Image (spheres, rainbow, N blue to C red):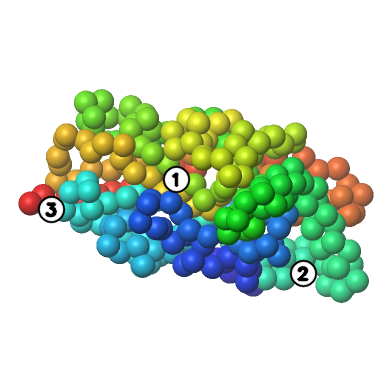
Amino acid sequence: MRNYFNILLGILSCVSLFACSDDNSIGNSPPLYATGLLLDGDGISKVGFYCIEKDSLRHFNYNDEVGYAPKTKTIGDYSDMLLCISIHSWYYSDWLSSRYGITNEAEKEKISKLKREYYKSKSALLVEDLDSFANHSRETVGRLWPAFFTAYVNGEVTITCDKPLYGELPGTNLGKYFDVISSGGCLPVGKESTRLLYHFGQKLPTDMEELFPQEAWLQPYYELHFKEHPSEKYDNLTLHLSFPMTIEHSLDYVVSQYNGRDYSRYTETVFEADCPINFNWD
């Protein structure tokens, strides 16, 4: 059965995982027993780009495709809003039988073990860095495992507007005018050879170019804030997000390895999303 995922299954809670705090940081990540596990990039179905009213955050579910999040909001002014990038994904509850037709329990256990080993090998540098930070810090976040997809930035992430904003012509990349908040705790890059641009315990960058460098590992949710409010006022405008990715089809790769077959596990795509906003200026 195809279900929109609360990925890492009982591990991720959409409400608590991405609850926003008063200091504009994003809340807790999955607990320690998830350490080393990743989310299959092949599960990514779309990228959502949403305006969220600050007094309505309790209604926001980062993987919501039909409820509150996609609705066009009417807000009083720029101070009433924040923006969210949500990487939507799905999950097969019994992925081996549903997706690959594998029903033998012994075979399923062997493949599931290969999957766990592959993810933990790929994330070993992060686990080591997290352990080091946790051993030298009393901060709770140092003992929690963040959610990362096997999906990576593949080019410039851009935000444009259909109207002049910040004195810039429509279609100009406005990314430099936003702060981007991530719950990652670290910033890994590299689809093959992983390195950490920022370690656990270090303050992550909020500049879009710095947070989304080439081959940066991706998370399910990012929160965006204006660095300063635009001077232009419109009855409505539409912001547009372009998000180029390299998708690693990690489950397909693991099953192919189990069957002794070669598999080219990467594909490239660009996700596009519009965020229409209405204004009711005082």
- What secondary structure is marked by label 3? loop
Amino acid under disc 1: Ile
Q: Position of residue 159 (x, y in %)?
A: 38, 36
Which label sits on residue 181? 1
Residue type marked 2: Ser
Whole-percent x, y for residue 180 in the image: 42, 41
Secondary structure under the numbered disc 2 in the rendered image = helix
Determine the image quadrant of residue 214.
top right
- The residue that label 2 is drawn on is 97
What residue appears at the point 49 percent right and 66 percent down from the top-left corner?
A: 16
Q: Nearer the viewer, residue 249 or 60?
A: 60
Task: Give the camera-side residue of 58 and 257.
Answer: 58
Quarter of the rendering occupied by the N terminus: bottom right
Local secondary structure at mark 1 = strand
Q: What mark, if any, has residue 280 been given in the picture?
A: 3
Would residue 178 be found to the left or right of residue 214 on screen? Answer: left
Query: Neighbour class for label 3 at 10 Å: few (<14), some, many (≥20)?
Result: few
Quarter-wise, where is residue 176 in the image? top left
Residue at left offset 39%, top offset 63%: 60
Taking the spot 33% from the left edge, 27% from the top edge, the residue there is 172
Where is residue 259 drawn, in percent x and y?
A: 90, 54
Residue type at mark 3 is: Asn
Nearest to viewer (mark 1 / mark 3): 1
Q: Are marks 2 and 3 in contact (CB under 8 Å)?
A: no
Does residue 73 appear to the left or right of 46 in the view shown? Answer: left
Q: CA distance from mark 1 to mark 3?
A: 27 Å
Q: Determine the CA span between mark 2 and mark 1.
A: 38 Å
Query: Mark 2 or mark 3, which has the lower sequence index?
Result: 2
Q: Can residue 179 be seen in this snapshot?
A: yes
171 in relation to 253, above or below: above
